[in-house]
Image (cartoon, rainbow, N blue to C red):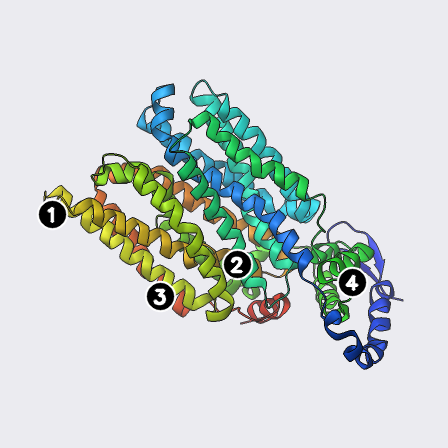
C-alpha cells in the first residue's frame, strides 16, 4: 500500500484510507441511481449549511467595511477633539493599510497552518483590541496603534474570507456567494458612513466591535474548509465537513474524489518556496492576480472612500453629510446586483463595465473641480461632483470591488495558494496605502488632476481585463487552476 507524505506537517496517511471509501461509494452508485426516483430531490443535497457558513464568514467582511469607512465620518471630530493636523490624520487614515500589509504577508501562512477558521478567529481578536484602543485614545499614538491592529485583522480577513467561501461553495454558486464578501464590505462602509453622521467617533467604534463578536461566536458552529482538511491529511474531518456542507442526502463521492485526486497530485510536488511563485507555470496566475489588485486600488477607491466627507465639502457642499449618506445608500444594492450578474454575465464583462463607469465618474468629478477652480457654473459644480462620485462608487461596487477577490480565490492551486494569496493581498494593501496616504496631498496639488489621474487608471484597466484576464465562470477550482498553471 502506498504511503503519501503531507507537504505541510509531515503526517503520513494511507492512500487506501482516502480512496477506499470513495471506491465503495462509487460501487454503490448504480444502486443509488436505481433509487433516485424514489428519493426525489433528496439526493441533490442542501446548500443551507453553505449559506450559514458564508453568512458567518462575511461578518469578517462587514468588519473590513467598518474599518475602511471609519476615517471618513470621524475625520473632523477626531481632529477637533485631539487636535490633530492634516498630516497626523492622514497617518491615522493610512496606517490601517500598513497593518493590512503586515496581515497580508502573514495571511497565507496563518490560513494554511491554523486553517481558514483559525485565521478568521485570530483576525477578529486583533480587530477587537484595535477598536478598544481607538475608543479610549487620548492622543495620536494610541489612535494609530489601534488603527494598526484593526488593519492587521482586516489584512488577514481580506484574504481568508473569499478563499474560505470559494472552497466550501459548489461551482455554480461560487461567483455569487463569493461576491457576498464585497456586499458585506460595502454594507460595513455604508453603516459607518450613515451612523457616523449622528453619533460621536468614540461611540462609533462599538459598531466595529459587533461583527468581530458575531464572527467569533459563529465560527463555533460552521465546518472548516474541506479542501484545507484534505490538504493537511485529516481524512475523516474532510469527509464529515463536505457532507455537512452538501447535506446528508447528497452524493459527495464525485466531488470528494476530484478534490482528493487534485490534493494527491499537489502532494507529490516539493514544498513551495517564495521563488517558486515566479516559475513559468504560475506566471499567468500571478500576473492576473497582481494586475487586478493594482488596477483596483490605483483607480482611487480608498482615497475617495477614506476622505469622502472632505471631498464633498471641497466640491462646494456646506456639509459632507448628504453626499456621505448617499454613498452609503448606493453601495449595497449595486453590489448585490453585481453578485447576481457575476454567474450570469461572467467575470470579465462585469469588470469592463465597472471600469468604464469608474472612468466616467472620475472624469465628471474632475470636470467639476476644474470648473470650480475657474469659477464657472458654480451652481452646478457640487451636483456634478456628487454625480461623479456616486457613479464611481456604484460602478466600483458592481464589479471592480468584488470580482478581483473572486478571481484571486479561484486561480491559484492549493499548494501555493497561501503564498500567492499573501503576495497578491500585500500588493492590494500597498496600493491602498499609497492611495490613501497621498490622496490629501494630491487634492492640495490639483483636485481636478487627481480625478483625471484615476480616470486614466480605469481606462487602462479595461484594456488589461480585455487582453489578459480569463473567464472563470462555471468551472471548478481544479479545472481553472490546471488550465491556468500548466506550462504556457
According to the picture, the residue beneath numbered tag 3 turns out to be 463
Comparing marks 3 and 1, which lies closer to the viewer?
1
Q: Closer to the N terminus: mark 1 or mark 4?
A: 4
> Which of the two discs, 2 and 1, labels the residue nearer the N terminus?
1
Q: Earlier in the sequence, mark 3 or mark 1?
A: 1
Viewed as shown, does residue 62 lie left or right of 442? right
**139 in relation to 14, above or below:** above
How many other residues sit within 10 Å of disc 4, few (<14), some (14-19) or many (≥20)? Answer: some
Residues at marks 1 and 4 touching, judged by CB atoms closer than 8 Å: no
Q: Is residue 258 above or below residue 109?
A: below
Q: CA distance from mark 3 to mark 1?
A: 34 Å
Quick check: 71 left or right of 216? left
Name the disc covering residue 406, or none: 2
Query: Which is closer to the viewer, label 4 or label 2?
Result: 4
Name the secondary structure under disc 2: helix
Q: Kindly indicate whether the residue at mark 2 contacts the one at mark 3 (C-beta within 8 angstroms).
A: no
Q: Which residue is mark 1?
A: 377
In the rendering, at what x and y percent does residue 311 appear? 28, 40
Picture quarter containing residue 248?
bottom right
x and y percentages locating residue 63 in the rendered image: 53, 41
Disc 4: which residue: 248
For the residues bearing labels 3 and 1, Cβ distance under 8 angstroms: no
Mark pair 3, 2: CA separation:
19 Å
Upstream in sequence: badge 4 or badge 2:
4
Q: Nearer the viewer, residue 132 or 18?
A: 132
**Mark sitting on residue 195:** none
Up/down of 271 relative to 190, above or below: below
- Disc on the earlier residue, 3 or 4: 4
Mark 3 vs mark 4, CA separation in Å: 46 Å
Looking at the image, is mark 3 or mark 2 earlier in the sequence? 2
- Image quarter where the N terminus lies is bottom right
Amino acid at each position: 500500500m502506498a504511503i503519501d507524505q503531507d507537504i505541510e506537517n509531515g503526517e503520513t496517511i494511507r492512500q487506501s484510507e482516502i480512496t477506499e471509501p470513495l471506491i465503495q461509494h462509487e460501487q454503490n452508485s448504480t444502486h443509488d441511481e436505481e433509487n433516485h426516483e424514489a428519493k426525489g430531490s433528496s439526493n441533490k443535497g442542501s446548500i443551507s449549511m453553505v449559506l450559514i457558513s458564508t453568512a458567518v464568514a462575511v461578518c469578517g467582511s462587514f468588519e473590513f467595511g467598518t474599518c475602511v469607512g471609519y476615517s471618513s465620518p470621524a475625520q473632523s471630530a477626531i481632529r477637533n477633539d485631539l487636535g490633530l493636523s492634516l498630516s497626523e490624520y492622514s497617518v491615522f487614515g493610512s496606517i490601517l493599510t500598513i497593518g493590512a500589509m503586515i496581515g497580508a504577508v502573514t495571511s497565507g501562512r496563518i490560513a494554511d497552518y491554523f486553517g481558514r477558521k483559525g485565521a478568521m478567529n485570530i483576525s477578529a481578536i486583533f480587530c477587537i483590541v484595535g477598536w478598544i484602543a481607538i475608543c479610549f485614545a487620548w492622543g495620536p499614538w494610541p489612535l494609530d496603534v489601534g488603527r494598526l491592529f484593526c488593519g492587521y485583522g482586516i489584512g488577514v480577513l481580506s484574504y481568508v474570507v473569499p478563499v474560505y467561501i470559494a472552497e466550501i461553495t459548489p461551482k455554480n454558486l461560487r461567483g455569487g456567494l463569493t461576491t457576498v464578501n464585497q456586499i458585506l464590505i460595502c454594507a460595513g462602509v455604508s453603516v459607518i458612513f450613515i451612523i457616523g453622521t449622528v453619533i460621536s467617533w468614540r461611540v462609533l467604534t462599538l459598531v466595529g466591535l459587533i461583527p468581530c463578536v458575531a464572527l467569533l461566536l459563529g465560527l463555533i458552529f460552521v465546518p472548516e474548509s474541506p479542501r484545507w482538511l484534505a490538504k493537511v491529511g485529516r481524512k475523516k474531518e474532510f469527509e464529515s465537513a463536505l457532507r455537512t456542507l452538501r447535506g446528508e442526502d447528497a452524493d459527495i463521492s464525485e466531488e470528494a474524489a476530484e478534490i482528493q485526486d487534485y490534493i494527491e497530485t499537489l502532494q507529490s510536488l516539493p514544498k513551495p518556496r517564495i521563488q517558486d511563485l515566479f516559475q513559468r507555470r504560475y506566471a499567468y496566475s500571478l500576473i492576473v492576480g497582481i494586475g487586478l489588485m493594482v488596477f483596483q486600488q490605483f483607480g482611487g477607491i480608498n482615497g475617495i472612500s477614506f476622505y469622502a466627507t472632505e471631498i464633498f465639502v471641497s466640491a462646494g457642499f456646506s456639509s459632507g453629510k448628504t453626499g456621505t449618506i448617499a454613498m452609503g445608500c448606493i453601495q449595497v444594492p449595486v453590489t448585490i446586483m453585481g453578485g447576481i450578474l457575476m454567474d450570469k454575465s461572467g467575470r470579465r464583462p462585469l469588470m469592463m463595465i465597472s471600469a468604464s463607469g469608474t472612468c466616467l465618474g472620475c472624469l465628471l468629478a474632475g470636470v467639476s473641480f476644474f470648473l470650480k477652480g475657474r469659477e464657472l457654473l458654480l451652481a452646478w459644480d457640487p451636483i456634478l461632483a456628487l454625480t461623479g462620485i456616486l457613479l464611481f462608487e456604484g460602478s466600483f461596487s458592481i464589479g471592480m470591488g468584488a470580482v478581483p477577490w473572486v478571481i484571486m480565490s479561484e486561480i491559484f492551486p492549493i499548494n501555493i495558494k497561501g503564498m500567492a494569496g499573501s503576495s497578491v493581498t500585500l500588493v492590494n494593501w500597498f496600493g491602498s496605502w499609497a492611495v490613501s496616504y497621498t490622496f490629501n496631498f494630491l487634492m492640495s496639488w490639483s483636485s481636478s488632476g487627481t480625478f483625471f489621474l484615476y480616470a486614466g487608471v480605469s481606462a487602462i484597466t479595461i484594456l488589461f481585463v480585455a487582453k489578459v484576464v480569463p473567464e472563470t465562470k462555471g468551472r471548478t477550482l481544479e479545472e481553472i487552476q490546471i488550465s491556468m498553471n500548466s506550462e504556457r
